[in-house]
Amino acid sequence: MKKPLVFLTILYILGIVFGLYVSIPVWVLLLSLLVTVAGAYFFLNNARIFFLSVLAAFFLMGAFSLSLSLTFPEDHIKNYTPSSGLNVVLSGTVITEPVYKKNKSVFIINAENLKILESTLEVSGKVLVWCFKENQINIHDHITAQGKLYQPFPFDSGKKLNYRDYLAQKAIYSQFSISGGSVLITEKKRGSNVLLKGMQRLKGKIRGIIDVNLSASASGLISAMILGDRTRVPDILNESLQRSGTVHVLAVSGLHTGIIILIALLFFRMFAMHYRLRYILVILVLAFYCWFTGNRISVFRATIMASVFLLGEIINRDYDPMSALSLSALIILWVNPAELFNVGFQLSFCSVLSIFLISNKIIMSSPLRFKEVKAIRFLIQGFSVSLGAWIGTVGIVAYYFNIFTPISVMANIIIIPLLFLIILSAVLFIFLGGIIPGAASVLALNCEFFTVLLYKVNSLLISIPMAYLELADISLKYVFLYYIILSILCFYESINCRQSLKHAD
């Protein structure tokens, strides 16, 4: 069977969807999975039964992993969290770097102890904390605080995007609010991860360089692209990019990862080293960048795919992008199967998948005389990638965000090269600015220029008539119908290509 990893991933995803809509006890799924795995072992010599058993095992594994993630122990803090709010004393360890927003900080803790009235309980589970008072909290600190414990509110509950469901996808079912008058005790944990502390200091230094040398609008944009901090992006820019279908440039994504790969390859190429060592160093840079930006889904996916490609080059093995994409999806969904229902996961994987399936067909269908001219061929390739990504994500965007952005194809062709210039300028500005402080103010001019250019170009694009259309709510069945038709067309085209090759032979 060609590309077995693709089929196994599809079965695993179908199992997750099955587990969401069909309630089966975890022990039943586990028993069925063990029986299926045993059947595959006993029928190793029968290729057909072995193949069907493996497919069934991955299906059951998907259903089991989702059911297991939705099964909570008795001490889980979800079981003690009321909907209306309850005054408690909560203790736990900070597991994410605090994000500061005006008069508050936001972070996640692993809950450890909960005091309700005179009773103290040992608890477990993640809690999203909103702290409305000045603090010096860092990741891995242990905190004890008085505050209000409550379930997340389902903001926008009438729409497709639901804040409570979004947090549930991150395994967060409780929120804790620390008001200005509450008691907050912070204990610095001894022997905490030195690497995490070093990363925090590095992020703080980068933030300092950005804030001191750039205007508010430019610093918000650069912080989003380099650090993954979108809290300071001006609302007007965020809305403008949404209308042009290019809001993905703000989030640290696979596109940014690709640019980092290119910059790293160009940098290491300046040194006289074997290509294998160069590729290993690029993989290490990718791993650090993924960790540095918070292991976001799109970055993690791009890191896995690029690492598989580079490892293949190192050991002289062919690269199959579909298998690499499937591997990254399997790893992400194995860790947290609920990510399948996250709009970020869906957009990330559908865009890349549609690029693989559609962009090459667009290039092949273009006139030969155009492909012979290097400049025109480059434009065709850019257009095919942009159109392929748009076709793959237009249904998801329309469903979740109620917007249709035909200008997106043209906008991405123009803005993505500009994004490369912004990130390259930002990397040079931060790197050299950290070494030579006097150079930061000069190099910041490039970032300011390209940031203003992005504002102007995007504003011009969305001013074109019919650049974007705001839609009424779209039923999920129409979205499914769109993707079913798209899948049939891609499959039909692939069958035709294979038959043509057979006839040619």
Image (tube, rainbow, N blue to C red):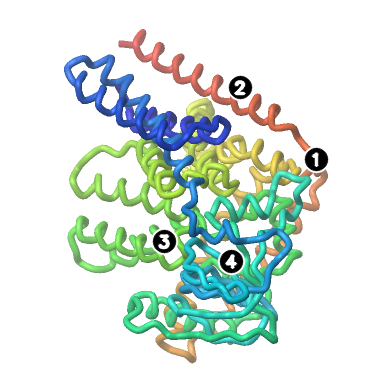
Residue beneath label 3, please?
Answer: 290
Instruction: Residue at 51% x, 58% y: name it.
Output: 76
Q: Name the amino acid, label 1.
A: Leu
Residue 204: where, in percent of width, then height?
Answer: 49, 82
At a point 46% along the width and 48% down the height, the residue shown is: 336
Task: In the rendered view, tell whether residue 40 sits above or below residue 146.
Answer: above
Q: Residue furthest top?
A: 503
In-image side of 230 versus 404 (left or right)? left
**In the foreground, 213 or 6:** 6
Image quadrant where residue 222 sits: bottom right
Mark 2 vs mark 3, CA separation in Å: 35 Å
Between the residue at mark 1 and the residue at mark 3, the CA separation in whole angstroms equals: 35 Å
**Measured Cα–Cα span from mark 4 to mark 2:** 41 Å
Q: Of the residues shown, which amino acid type is indicated by label 2?
A: Ile
Task: Please tell me whether residue 76 is drawn above or below residue 38 in the rendered image.
Answer: below
Q: Point out residue 423 in the picture as x, y percentages from the top left corner.
A: 51, 66
Q: Amino acid at mark 4?
A: Leu
Residue placed under numbered mark 1 in the picture: 471
Q: Badge 4, how many Cα within 10 Å: few under 14, some, many 20+?
A: many
